[in-house]
């Protein structure tokens, strides 16, 4: 599957107003639920928070890639969110996250989940990609 096919356009939010990491995760998970991608956002959020408790998914350079598997997820997806002012994600470099790529995978789909994470990381390293995303105004 191509990386571009994983993005759930209906659930994207290019103007997140959440003031905390947890609030942002809940917001994006509920958008994903409203788009039909997850049947129970609250259990998915629990999984995301459990993953964050292990170590922050704030990868630095104003990017966070929260990810988790849950039985309530219908199929693998990436839910993109952008925060203009940034959200404290406890990134190793101390920068707030402005670009959030929430990866959702069905329970037991670890291969898809890791493959999407690797592909996304590779794309984000390309010159100009981050700036284009920061400037994007439509999905």
Image: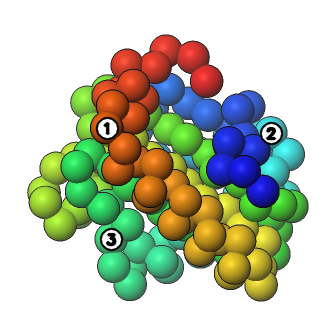
Q: Which residue is tagged 2?
A: 35
Query: Neighbour class for label 1 at 10 Å: few (<14), some, many (≥20)?
Result: few
**Secondary element at image label 1:** loop
Q: Residue at x 24, y 56 (%)?
A: 60
Residue farthest to the left, as pictured: 94
**Secondary element at image label 2:** loop
**Secondary element at image label 3:** loop
Q: Mark 3 or mark 1: which is in front?
A: 1
Q: Which mark is residue 97?
A: none
Q: Residue at x 16, y 50 (%)?
A: 95
Residue 48 seen in render? yes
User: What whole-number distance in Å separates the C-alpha atoms at marks 3 and 1?
Assistant: 25 Å
Q: Residue at x 48, y 71 (%)?
A: 49
Residue 50 left/right relative to 30: left
Q: Which residue is tagged 1?
A: 127
User: What whole-number distance in Å separates the C-alpha atoms at marks 1 and 2?
Assistant: 31 Å
Q: Which residue is tagged 3?
A: 56
Coordinates of residue 138 in the picture (x, y in percent): 57, 17
Q: Quadrant of residue 43?
A: bottom right
Q: Nearer the viewer, residue 129 or 82?
A: 129
Q: Earlier in the sequence, mark 3 or mark 1?
A: 3
Query: Neighbour class for label 2 at 10 Å: few (<14), some, many (≥20)?
Result: some
Coordinates of residue 5 in the picture (x, y in percent): 75, 44
Tell me, what colour scheme is on the image?
Answer: rainbow
The quarter of the picture where the C terminus appears is top right
Residue 58 left/right relative to 136: left
Q: Is residue 89 above or below residue 114?
A: above
Q: Mark 1 or mark 2: which is in front?
A: 1
Q: Nearer the viewer, residue 85 or 9?
A: 9
Q: Earlier in the sequence, mark 2 or mark 3?
A: 2
């Amino acid at each position: 599957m191509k990386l571009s096919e994983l993005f759930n356009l209906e659930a994207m939010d290019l103007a997140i107003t959440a003031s905390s990491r947890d609030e942002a995760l809940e917001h994006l998970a509920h958008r994903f639920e409203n788009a039909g991608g997850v049947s129970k956002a609250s259990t998915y959020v629990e999984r995301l928070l459990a993953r964050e408790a292990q170590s922050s998914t704030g990868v630095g350079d104003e990017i966070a890639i929260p990810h988790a598997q849950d039985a309530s997820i219908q199929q693998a997806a990436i839910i993109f969110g952008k925060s203009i002012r940034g959200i404290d994600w406890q990134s190793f470099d101390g920068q707030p996250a402005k670009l959030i790529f929430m990866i959702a995978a069905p329970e037991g789909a670890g291969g898809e989940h890791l493959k999407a994470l690797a592909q996304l990381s590779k794309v984000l390293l390309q010159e100009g990609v981050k700036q284009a995303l920061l400037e994007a105004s439509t999905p």
